[in-house]
Amino acid sequence: MAPVELRPATGSDGAAVADVYLRSYDAALPSVRRAHSDDEVRDFFTYVVVPRGGTWLAQAAGEPVGMMVLEGDELSQLYLAPEWRGHGIGDRFVALAKEHRPQGLSLWTFQVNAPAHRFYARHGFTEAERTDGSGNEEREPDVRFVWRPGAQAPGG
């Protein structure tokens, strides 16, 4: 596999970021209804998310293979192209997020996304809260995880 570069997304990366999000979401969360159409997602990433900053893109041989968005102390998005899972890109993104937010991070993930729960726990995130999903657009029960520097991961 080609080497993977992580870099800040630029204005021309909106479609690539959206593509990774769409492919990853649909592969990882087939039981969770997306709240927006493909075109709405592409417009949101192109005209809102990427322009406001904090978006990172992973590329291999010029192709988008992952994306991450940091908004304040929230890791608000981390998605990998399905065929690139298990190659350390998510680990690199989390390390980058911690480097940029050394005071701590939080994130939300759906309760049904057990692989994400294991991934974030492995990186020292702990469960802080569960909701019934009434506060998210998908109306899907979710979990908030937090990471604080110096906190020990369970079993660590």
Image (spheres, helix red, strand yellow):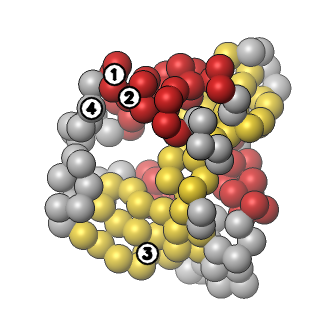
Residue 87 seen in this snapshot: no
105 relative position to 128: left or right: right
What's the distance in space between the residues labelled 2 and 4, CA to CA? 6 Å
Q: What's the CA distance linking mark 4 and mark 3?
A: 27 Å
**Residue 150, position in %: x, y?**
72, 84
Answer left or right for 99 relative to 55.
Answer: right
Q: Quick check: 12 above or below 91?
A: above
* Residue that numbered label 1 is attached to: 38
Badge 2 marks a residue whose secondary structure is helix
Which disc, if any, is residue 36? Answer: 4
| CA separation in Å, label 4 and label 1 | 7 Å
The reply to whether residue 77 is visible in this rendering is yes
Badge nearest the viewer, 1 or 3:
1
- Of tags 3 and 2, which is closer to the observer? 2
Residue nearer the viewer, 53 or 105: 53
Determine the CA span between mark 3 and mark 2.
28 Å
Cα–Cα span, label 1 and label 3:
31 Å
Residue 40 position by quadrant = top left
Disc 1 residue crowd, few under 14, some 14–19, many 20+, Cα 10 Å: some
Q: Which residue is mark 2?
A: 41
Q: Circle 4 sits in a helix, a strand or a loop, which is it?
A: loop
Q: Which mark is residue 142?
A: none
Q: Residue 148 at what x, y percent from top left? A: 63, 79
User: Do the residues bearing badges 1 and 2 touch, measured as CB atoms within 8 Å?
Assistant: yes
- Looking at the rendered structure, the kind of residue marked 3 is Glu
Secondary element type, mark 1: helix
Quadrant containing the C terminus in the rendered view? bottom right
Q: Residue at x 70, y 29 (%)?
A: 10
How packed mark 2 is, by other alpha carbons closer than 10 Å (few <14, some 14-19, many 20 or more), is many
Q: Closer to the N terminus: mark 2 or mark 4? A: 4
